[in-house]
Amino acid sequence: FGAVPAGCGALGKLEMRGQVSSDPVLGKYVVPFIGSDASVVRSSRRMMANILKQHEVNQLMPQFGIYFGFECTSSIAKVLAGGAVFQFLAGREWGRRMLLGHPGLFTFGAFSEAGPTPEQMQNNRWTGDFFAAGLVSGERRTLRLQGQLADPAYIGTSLLFSVVAETILQDRAGLASRGGVFTPAALFSTSSLLD
């Protein structure tokens, strides 16, 4: 996405890691996340700068990379093997029937048609580690933030959508723009969502 904008205080271009690398800060092996999160962050930056004309966004939005962390390389091998089996089965009609008919078998018990038990929901947790580095008044600074969400699947998602719906109802007139499709960061950038 081009050169780092002048004055943003970035420490150069974000280095992309290899397919599997070791992270000394986390003490884990990391692999690039194959989801859309990184592209959504980049799209948000473009929308806010070019469509919403929030020109200061070039100095505020970070360069962004997202990775999965694993305790050991055998866990990475299991995920790759499971992904290969899933991809093979999902590409065939009979395989899709098998996947849908036996979710517990193909997810090693992580999912089932019955849904989670209350105990599983209590023990379900998402942890995200966020790292930042940059220049503040010419001095190099680093920041580490760890976020945790109890039961991100059922309780967390329901809570998130309730708060977003309430924000839309309260701030509808002041939301970023009319028409089109927006990323959440672009749409809610001027709302009270994070207040």
Image: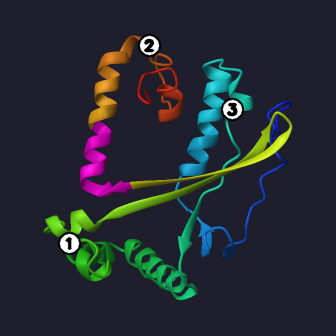
Label 2, on which residue? Answer: 174
Graded by Cα atoms within 10 Å as few (under 14), some (14 to 19) or many (20 or more), the crowding at tag 2 reads some
Q: Earlier in the sequence, mark 2 or mark 3?
A: 3
Q: Which residues are magenta?
A: 149-161
Label 2: which secondary element: helix
34 vs 128, nearest the viewer: 128
Could you say where residue 97 lies in the image, as x and y percent from the top left?
25, 74
| Residue at horizontal 31 percent and vertical 72 percent from the top | 96
Which numbered mark, 1 or 3, is in the foreground of this view? 3
Residue 120 quadrant: bottom left
Label 3, on which residue? Answer: 60
Could you say where residue 54 lies in the image, as x and y percent from the top left?
65, 20
- Quadrant (top left/top right/bottom left/bottom right) for the N terminus: top right
Label 1: which secondary element: loop
Graded by Cα atoms within 10 Å as few (under 14), some (14 to 19) or many (20 or more), the crowding at tag 3 reads few
Label 3: which secondary element: helix
Side of 37 where 137 appears, left or right: right
Could you say where residue 114 lies in the image, as x and y percent from the top left?
13, 68
- Asked if residue 152 is among those painted magenta in the image, a careful observer would answer yes
Identify the image's colour scheme: rainbow, by chain, secondary structure or one colour: rainbow
Q: Earlier in the sequence, mark 2 or mark 1?
A: 1
| Residue 104 visible here | yes
Side of 148 where 46 appears, left or right: right
Q: CA distance from mark 2 to mark 1?
A: 42 Å
Q: Main secondary structure of the magenta part?
A: helix
| Residue at horizontal 67 percent and vertical 25 percent from the top | 49
Label 1, on which residue? Answer: 112
Which numbered mark, 2 or 3, is in the foreground of this view? 3
- Asked if residue 131 is among those painted magenta in the image, a careful observer would answer no
Graded by Cα atoms within 10 Å as few (under 14), some (14 to 19) or many (20 or more), the crowding at tag 1 reads some
- Quadrant (top left/top right/bottom left/bottom right) for the C terminus: top left
